[in-house]
Image (cartoon, coloured by chain):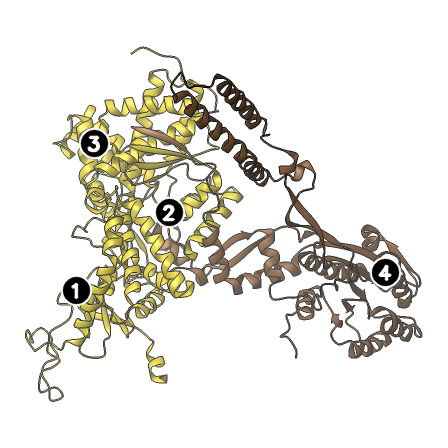
Chain colours: A yellow, B brown
Amino acid sequence: MTRRKPIATGSDWNFAILTEFEDEIARLADEYRLDTYPNQIEIITTEQMMDAYASVGMPVGYSHWSFGKQFLAVEQAYRRGQMGLAYELVINSDPCIAYLMEENTLMMQVLVMAHACYGHNSFFKGNYLFRTWTDASSIIDYLVFARKYIAECEERHGVTAVEQLLDACHALQNYGVDRYKRPSPISAAEESQRQEEREAYLQAQVNTLWRTIPTSSASEILAAGRGEEDPLGLHDGGRYPVEPQENLLYFIEKNAPLLAPWQREVVRIVRKLAQYFYPQRQTQVMNEGWATFWHYTLMNRLFDEGLVDEGLILEFLQSHTAVVNQPAFDSPYFSGINPYALGFAIFTDLKRVCQSPTDEDREWFPDIAGSDWRETLEFAMRNFKDESFIQQFLSPRVIRDLKLFMVVDDDQEEMLEVAAIHDERGYRRVREALATQYALSVREPNIQIYSADIRGDRSLTLRHVQDSRRPLARSVYPVIRHLHQLWGFPVRLESLESDEVVRRYQWPLPDEIKQE
Amino acid sequence: MSYFIDRRANAKHKSAVNRQRFLDRYRKHIKRSVEEAVNRRSITDMERGEKVSIPARDISEPVFQHGSGGKRTVVTPGNREFTEGDRLRRPGGGGGGGAGEGSASNQGEGVDEFAFTLSREEFLDFVFDGLELPHLERKALVDLDEVRPVRAGISRQGVPARMNIVRSMREAHARRIAMRAPIRRALREANEALEAEERKDPVLRNPARISELKEEIARLEKRMEAVPFIDTYDLRYNNLTNQPQPSSKAVMFCVMDVSGSMTQSHKDIAKRFFLLLYLFLERNYEKVELVFVRHHTAAKEVDEEEFFYSRETGGTIVSSALTLVDEIIADRYPPGQWNLYVAQASDGDNWDDDSATCRDLLVERLMSRLQYFTYVEITPHAHQALWEEYQNVAAEFPARFAMRQIVEAGDIYPVFRELFKRRVASP
């Protein structure tokens, strides 16, 4: 390898220099067979970065006060110097949009290009969750459609009405995703074209649902059998929906009796966007780890080839070290596990296992030890999400390096218990527990729609299956209040612990009902 | 394949709408914060924005979450001394320590404040929200000598700087068409004649006629060219005329008692009050001038520094100040051009016989010319003669004269709001 002259020195940059660096990074990425969408790299100012931040990185978004709140929070933190603006923001779209901030140094710009334009970008294109659940080519168009549609609604129905509807939808948006089936791809052109037909069709469907009184069929399903009160068995039509529904917003969109067509469409928009962000919530460790691994690799290659000088690489190492720093649990800087640190550690160690495995590695990873590292990493990136990725690839070595340990906090015990630490007996349990910690199904309460009383008082009943006796936080009341606004009739929520109802919530609150 | 786009010139405040919506939504909370800030702030300090905190609970966006309780397993980094089977006391506060992510956010609820900064404009919007200047009448047009130039069509005279290029060129174009038309017609006829002549049999041709026609054509072509492209006659200018303007100038007289009985804290309170009034006027008028008049037994016009900070002793004669205000108005601020406001602060002391004089001065000379007179009495004690006399004035001019008592700094803003509360239009 011939050492070449550095492309640039110092911390100033211009477009010519950036283009040159970009070409070199692209060449190296190609050498590593990183498969990416085309990059659209946008240079923006600090204010624009704050704007982008506030709208979760979406280049176009509909208007809502919560984004304003987000913006104020970012602005405040930035002004006080508590937070450097994240130096990278990248959008899962085709072409992949990445932002470079005007005031960054040259090193930062190169780093961000390596991290976002090749790291994240290849992850978006490769990982199975993104490929299954999101449609990179149409997201921007869809956002434009959503923004326009919501602005029209505001014009027609008033800002307040739309805002309240969005509030309610936002409260439920984590429950607006299909977890097990692939959604149909979203496309803006089609959306607006079909939107009107859909309105009419949906409304007709809902009307039918609420008008029909089905003849009694599968009457056994419901325990409440034919009684003296109902000799004709009109209430025996079985539970609706027949199966519990996990996608709350979808159910609302299709079944809420009183929503106007435009309101259904807004519910749909929030749901579609939630679905788009769903993979991101499940792959944080992997995604950041992957991007960090590649910026580290690519930057070092640039240095090896002499394309950057010592000054720049030292500045890079300082920044990189800060990014992958993991404070200990008792440090004042501790705020949970740093996904950059964990992900980077796992990918880096995976490479080591492939290249120079120890006996321990051969025992733990018999298939992987000594294999081609590039192929193994690609496989890991493509086919896992955080939960399964940790379960599969967290090595004893990383557990030791991070000194991971597991604490059990049981409210029936007086003391906390250290259940496992980073030793021979603990590795598997620590790994298992850490993987579970990243499972969305454990992080978020499991709540599903159990039944809608379409033949009676039209109340909606949800069921929450408790996980390890963990109850719902008090925020449950405002959330079911929002749900009640959407549904239009009483909403009940039952918490189940091993198939027994242990706690009931409802909205409107019972005493309010009495007052009425 | 990659490409760069420079977006720096694009619009910045994409979040402005969202920001405004947030502020509107939490108007009530923000107002409370702003009120506290006004009372807390040091006097010179109204010129900046304000940090505002809202209880995070009030603006949280609720989602289904796990509450505390039940059995939780947490993996955290950085173990030093623990081994398997160790038992630890629960760290205080439930969350903290080993609890790690997930629980931290909901445990802290109720304590957290959502803090952000209002810009100066936004801050003042909130400070003066719902307030209005009473009798903000634009001065009648007749007695006004203030004018503003406004566009008034197009004229043929003007200075080059006001030339309307488009209109001038259009005029020139029209004139060229008009002036060339007869020449062009003659030229066409001459050409046709020439052609007809040349088409004739060579024997029948009239060479004299041909050369005559050729000359004619050359002459006409020359005339065509001589039509000027642009002429002074074409030039058009944007016309401006002077339109009389309602006055948007205001002058605010700050009148303060600086006799021995006024302590520095009295003055501070007065100063805050004056400052609020000044900022408020500044928002309503293009130009606000300040006149500081202080008095003990004699009144004097001073600058701001001296007004607030120099110390005096002695008795109090309020009428001296009112007389001076009257003189200054006569001298420098003709009421036809200026909106006049007087704000007086005092601890209520006055020379016994003087209060009646004050009333007469106000009723007979001043009140008819003023937009508004506010009097604040900074005292925890019982009112004296001045207050009672002023009450008579207030009874006579209920719409233009307002008086309130301030006991401590915390009263300033409420009193101010009360004085300038937007009133439902009275019949």
How far apart in space, not on screen, are marks 1 and 2 (Cα)?
35 Å
**Chain for disc number 4:** B
Q: Position of residue B150 (x, y in %)?
A: 67, 51
Foreground label between 4 and 1: 4
In which quadrant of the rendered image does the C terminus of chain B lie?
bottom right
- In primary-sequence order, the first of circles 1 and 3 is 1
Foreground label between 1 and 2: 2
Label 2 belongs to which residue? A60
Horizontally, residue B179 falls left or right of residue A47, namely right
Q: Position of residue B233 (x, y in %)?
A: 65, 37
Foreground label between 2 and 4: 4
Q: Within 10 Å of the Cα at label 3, are there few (<14), some (14-19), or many (20+) other Cα atoms?
A: some
**Chain for disc number 3:** A
Q: Amino acid at mark 3?
A: Leu
Q: Amino acid at mark 4?
A: Ile
Q: Secondary structure at mark 1?
A: loop
- Viewer-closest of A374 and A155: A155
Q: Are marks 3 and 2 on the same chain?
A: yes
Label 3 belongs to which residue? A377
Please give the name of the residue rendered at 68% of the width and 68% of the height, measured from the top-left corner.
B420
Foreground label between 3 and 4: 4
Horizontally, residue A502 falls left or right of residue A221, namely right
